[in-house]
Amino acid sequence: MTHAALRHRRRPRAAAGMTLLEMLLVIALVAVSASLAVMAMGGGREGQQLRSAVRELNAQLRYTRTQAIVHGQMQQFQINPATGQWQAANGRQGQLPGRLRVRFTGAAQLQPSAGIGAIAFYPDGGASGGRIELIGQRAGWQLDVAWITGQVAGKAIAGERR
């Protein structure tokens, strides 16, 4: 090979690709866009609180049903819609986020006191039935307890209108 051919071969090509800075900028823009899309679709912090509260209530309702079956005696799940406080079997208790509005529909004769909703779970797996609705500004969720089977099912509902 001639000397001129070697010089030509060693010479770097002019801007054939992207620089590291350009790639990092593109990655940052994609990350920001993705996080904005997730917040818009998921309702942001309120959406996270709603999903977390639904998971917790769902788990506690199922736990109370399981305890009724295992111990062979009726167990109650109680909720105070005004304060968002709930109590499950074996003294488990918790508090729903204050931003969520709670509505309860269930058997009036099971209410331990005015304003407190209760769902009874029986040793055969059945329940008194009931519905708990958690409602935020943009979204809501409804948990239904079937009265014959005691199964807990949930579905999304529309949130409050401003």
Image (cartoon, rainbow, N blue to C red):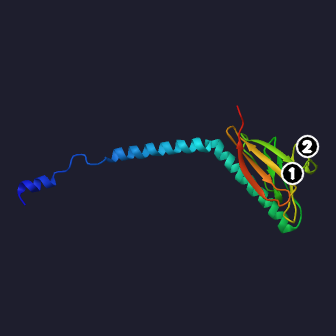
- Residue 96: x and y in percent read 74, 46
State left or right for residue 9 relative to residue 113: left
Q: Name the residue under label 2.
A: 114
Assess disc 2: are there few (<14), some (14-19) or many (≥20) residues with their C-alpha within 10 Å of its C-alpha.
Answer: few
Quarter of the image holding residue 5? bottom left
Number of numbered tags placed on the structure image: 2
- Between residues 16 and 84, which one lies in front from this camera angle? 16
Which residue ends up furthest to the left in the rendered image?
2
CA gap, disc 2 to disc 1? 11 Å
The residue sitting at 40% across, 44% down in the picture is 26
Residue 38, given in percent of the width and then of the height, sits at 56, 45
Q: Name the residue under label 1.
A: 118
- Label for residue 81? none
Residue drawn where x is 64% and y is 46% of the image: 48
Left/right of residue 120 with respect to residue 43 in the rendered view: right
Q: Callout 1 environment at 10 Å: few (<14), some (14 to 19), or many (20+)? A: many
Tell me which residue sits at (44%, 42%) in the image.
29
Residue 27 location (% of width, % of height): 42, 47
Query: Can you tell which quarter of the image residue 90 is in?
Result: bottom right
What amino acid type is highlighted by mark number 2? Ala
Secondary structure state at the residue bearing disc 2: loop
Is 150 in front, or is 66? 150
Q: Is residue 63 left or right of residue 138?
A: right
Q: Quadrant of the N terminus?
A: bottom left
Residue at 38% from the left image edge and 46% from the top image edge: 24
Element assignment for label 1: strand
Q: For the residues labelled 2 and 1, say whether their Cβ atoms are less than 8 Å apart.
A: no
Tell me which amino acid carries mark 1: Ala
Residue 55, percent across and down? 70, 53
Q: Is residue 53 left or right of residue 75?
A: left
